[in-house]
Image (cartoon, grey):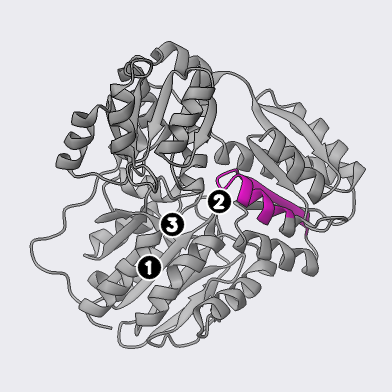
Amino acid sequence: MRALVVDDSKASRSIVARALRDLRFDCDEATNGAEAIERLAAGPRPDLVTVNWHMPVMDGIELVRRLRQHPRHRDLRLLMISTESDRAKIDAALAAGADDFVSKPFTADALARKLVGLGVCSATEISAGANRGPIRVLIVDDSMTIRSLLTATLSADPDLKVVGAAVNGRAAVEMVASSPPDIVLLDVEMPVLDGISALREIRRLEPKLPVIMFSSLTDRGAKATLDALLAGANDYAAKPAGLDAAAVAAVIRDDLVAKIKALVPRGQRLDRPPAGVTAVVRRSAATAPGPVRAVVIGVSTGGPTALAEVLPAIAAEAKVPVLIVQHMPAFFTTQLAERLAKICGRDIREATDGSPLKGGEILLAPGGRHLTVAGDAAAPRVRITDDAPEQSCRPAADVLFRTAAKIWGAGVLGVVLTGMGRDGLAGARAIVEAGGMVIAQDEFSSVVWGMPGEVAKAGLADAVLPLARIGPEVALRLARRGR
């Protein structure tokens, strides 16, 4: 099957094209309506054309009208994909000749259902396409030993297929440009072009291509990996010290494979309800909530980038404690706090045991240890513990959320951002039961919609928002309900 994706935004084209390629479409792209008409005149006839509404030169509505007037193109399947969501706007697009309409953001399942409804393909064809073939992995590492270990260990999993191995960042960028894989495993320190520079070039080519950094546990490697995470890498896995084959293979099997499969979910069935349908926004109480006394944030996979976007708006308004749990080892969190402090232009540091909690402080849980709140609302203080992990996590958002709810009750505002697993679900429930409020990140903007998805689907969130709106929303609530 063939599709033409028409959108002036490179990032949006990449998102739509990747979703269609996952459904086994061959995709061509155009940046506006005029270019789309040229592509249609010169190339083979597509089975589907997706059209953005607002574009320069020729917008989507005009493109749809012209295609419907052209004898060769009037029966093309035209799907409008736009940020417009008003019913009148949707009706206007359909009246112009679009066969159907999808509002951004959308899920892959939602898009697939539209294609079935349009008759572009059958549910059986899409289900077979979604389930067909393993996850295609590109390995990038200058060490032959690591490349060999990765190839051998990943290839032993029937859901994974190594489709290439690059010895440096430049070769990796060329491979991605010629044939994008499903995911890239990227070393940091390499000759010719290092991992961070390669990541930036990969992001320009494929903004949504999942990338996992696979780097050493050294202090230098940790700093570089954190730089990569803030530059857009989706996740990381730490190589054991040295090149002990058994230790590296164990990390690959026990850590890396799970992260690959979380970032590139396969086998999604069309008869499963889209995640967006199962997210239930909680109805807030009729009475207006009281002032926010503390903000607690839980985040995992994709966290450094998410925090770098959310925190500046919160930091500008916060006159209450802001406490953060990011799933990370100890040698990362100190550096993450320093990087976030530079981004926000104010002090952000790791929490220390026994210190009093002051208004306006932004504290990060130290890696590998739980961050809890002790004392009372009049004199809250930090307590750091080595208690058992919860949901296999230490630090755990559940622990922070639960103890914060005991101290501040209805004054707690919880925020659950992108991440694997269920951490934050029980804690969000404790916040809601205490009368507090919870915001969850939406599926479309999440690197992995595990943690926020569990909260949203349980009906514990009073708002499910894209990442770009969460910081301003928290800041607005802080400004309106006291600081």
Span colored in magenta: 198-216
The local secondary structure at tag 1 comes to helix
Q: Is residue 369 magenta?
A: no
Across the whole image, how many numbered discs are drawn on residues?
Answer: 3
Among numbered discs 2 and 3, the one appearing first in the sequence? 2
The x and y percentages for residue 325 are 50, 65
Q: Name the residue under label 3.
A: 417
40 or 7, nearer to the observer? 40
C-alpha span from label 2 to label 3: 18 Å
* Residue 253 appears in the picture as rendered: no
| Residue located 85% across and 40% down the image | 147
Which of labels 2 and 3 is toward the front? 3
- Label 2: which secondary element: loop
Give amino acid for label 3. Answer: Leu
- Give whichever of discs 1 and 3 has the lower sequence position: 3
Label 2: few (<14), some (14–19) or many (≥20) C-alpha neighbours in 10 Å: few
The residue tagged 2 is 392
Say which residue label 1 marks.
471
Residue 365 shows in this picture? yes
Q: For this rendering, which residue is in front, 423 or 41?
A: 41
Identified by mark 1, the residue type is Gly
